Image (tube, rainbow, N blue to C red):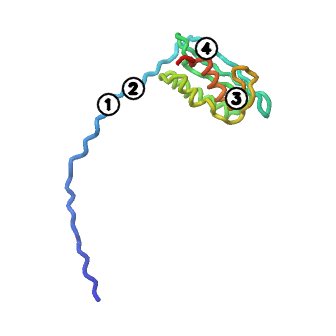
């Protein structure tokens, strides 16, 4: 029994007009507001009593002329290069965010409550417990820079 010969179907491609891109509203490029070369700053020493001893964390915030936070530096003693590098990275990202207009409150809400080692009591009545370095720094930023009436 012979099979029927397959039919060849030829298709012609007809070019169509390219779809028009949807016009998007103009977006203003973000503007970075740098701090002046000479500026005020606030530094807070925070001790975290954890399983391996006491860790000292220093959080320094550079201020704009009006007292708003404009940059963040984090330093922890007795931490290896990995943790120190990560803290530097977080501080740089936070500083850039602040200089591009991100409110301190937005940073606080993202960092507060993060939980990882080292964690423990602080011995500070305002910051009783640190769930992590980022948690305690965020809660200090909230106390110092976020207005309670906003």
Mark 3 vs mark 2, CA separation in Å: 38 Å
Q: Earlier in the sequence, mark 3 or mark 2?
A: 2
24 or 15, which is in the foreground? 24
Near mark 4 (Cα within 10 A), the count class, few <14, some 14-19 or many ≥20, is some
What residue lies at 58% left-to-right and 16% top-to-bottom? Answer: 62
Q: Earlier in the sequence, mark 3 or mark 4?
A: 4
Task: Locate residue 86: give its quadrant.
Answer: top right
Q: Which mark is residue 29?
A: 2
Q: Which mark is residue 41?
A: 4
99 or 145, which is in the foreground? 145
The residue to which callout 1 is attached is 25
Circle 2/circle 4 CB separation < 8 Å: no
Mark nearer the viewer, 2 or 1: 1
Mark 1 vs mark 4, CA separation in Å: 39 Å
Q: Tell me the SS state at disc 2.
A: loop
In this view, which residue lies farthest toward the bottom?
1
Q: Earlier in the sequence, mark 3 or mark 1?
A: 1
**Residue 57 rendering spot, x and y as whole percentages:** 70, 24
**Residue 78 rendering spot, x and y as whole percentages:** 74, 29
Mark 3 vs mark 4, CA separation in Å: 23 Å
**Residue 19 rendering spot, x and y as whole percentages:** 25, 45
The residue to which callout 3 is attached is 130
Mark 3 vs mark 1, CA separation in Å: 44 Å
Q: Tell me the SS state at disc 1.
A: loop
């Amino acid at each position: 029994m012979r099979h029927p010969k397959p039919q060849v179907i030829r298709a012609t491609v007809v070019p169509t007009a390219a779809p028009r891109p949807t016009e998007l509203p103009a977006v203003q490029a973000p503007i970075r507001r740098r701090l002046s070369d000479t500026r005020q700053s606030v530094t807070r020493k925070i001790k975290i009593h954890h399983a391996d001893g006491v860790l000292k964390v220093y959080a320094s915030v550079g201020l704009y002329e009006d007292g708003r936070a404009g940059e963040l530096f984090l330093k922890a003693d007795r931490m290896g290069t990995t943790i120190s590098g990560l803290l530097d990275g977080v501080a740089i990202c936070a500083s850039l965010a602040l200089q591009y207009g991100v409110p301190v409150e937005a940073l606080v809400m993202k960092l507060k409550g993060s939980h990882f080692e080292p964690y423990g009591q602080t011995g500070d009545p305002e910051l009783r417990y640190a769930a992590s370095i980022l948690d305690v720094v965020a809660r200090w930023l909230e106390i110092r820079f976020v207005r309670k009436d906003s």
